[in-house]
Amino acid sequence: MYAMREAVAAFKRAPVLTGLSSAMVGLALFVVGLFGLATYNLQLALSAIEERVEVVVYLRDDARQSEIDLLLTELADFEEVRQVRYVSKRDALERARVELPEFGELFMDSEVNPLPQSLEVELRQGFRNPEVVEKLSFAAEGYPFVEDAQYGEEWVDRLFALRRIGAASAGVLGVAFALVAALIIGTALRIAIFARRDEIYIMRLVGAKNGFIRRPFLLEGAMAGLAGALLAWSLTYGTYRGVYAYLFEIAWVPGTWVVLGLVAGTAFGAVASALAIRRHLREI
């Protein structure tokens, strides 16, 4: 209770200094919050594109229905496959008329359907990668009545290369931003502690132990970190609402990320304060 009262009293005694510390913490975490918001939406965008990864097996016009059913069953037996859909020549033509209206007249005027029948192989989540689609394509091309098997090799490779680059960049930049935030928080709280060096010196003179001196500062640092985290959350959410309303639609980060951000801000404040007071106590 003493430590809590002292921490609250410190905020009241020097509201400008403590407010400045909380603001510096908030701005540092605001940068981390913006990076997290951008990273999360990038993940959603890549996941949406990844869901479209599939293998299309084009069949010869003279393929018998029994052969098609056999291939459909054998492809569906792969553990990586979610489902296999048969697309007839007529269905392919109807789809082309809807999805490619600029070629509508060509399709309408043609007496012969130029589009092949096919099997669309949809993959399970977690198996939409170049290795799996290449394996399925190779397996399908082994049948003599299969004309071709395609999966957009070039764009699939680019998609997963982009995912790897995005994951690596997110990790490196996330750690870098966190370290910068920790340095800013530590500097701000060290300034606050240095402003109270006379108080600490007097407490040491009357016999106060280091733990007794340290506890109020730890709570003060945690409170400053929490206040800064709340400020960062409000700034990040305000930015999100502004972008959503005036630029383009984006998704808000999960609630667990917000809770982790608040906990991280509180922890940053406590740890930075602990390091600062430890170093200061050594100098007295």
Image (tube, grey):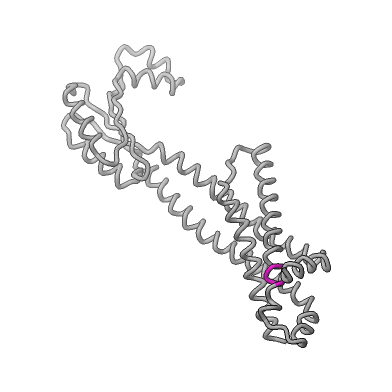
**On-image quarter of the N terminus:** bottom right
Residue 159 or residue 212, whichever sits in front = 212
- Splitting the image into 4 quarters, where does residue 115 fall? top left
- Figure quadrant of residue 84: top left
- Residue 116 in the magenta stretch? The answer is no
Q: Position of residue 230 (x, y in %)?
A: 69, 54
Residue drawn at point x = 65 percent, y = 74 percent: 274
Name the main secondary structure of what is drawn in magenta. Answer: helix
Q: Residue at x 24, y 27 (%)?
A: 59
- Describe residue 220's horizontal placement relative to residue 9 as left or right: left
Which residue is located at x 42 percent, y 41 percent?
A: 50
Can you say which quadrant of the picture contains the C terminus? bottom right
Q: Is residue 193 above or below residue 226?
A: below
Q: Residue at horizontal 79%, vertical 84%?
A: 202
| Magenta-drawn segment | 216-220
- In this image, 260 relative to 15: left or right? left
Residue extending furthest toward the front: 1
Q: Pick whichever, 67 or 256, lies toward us.
A: 256
118 vs 36, left or right, is: left
Please state the total of marks drawn on the protein image.
Answer: 0
Residue 219 within the magenta-colored segment of the rendering: yes
- Image x and y of residue 64, in percent: 17, 22
Residue 102 drawn at (x, y percent) = 46, 21
The x, y position of residue 160, in whole percent, is 40, 48
Res. 87 image quadrant: top left
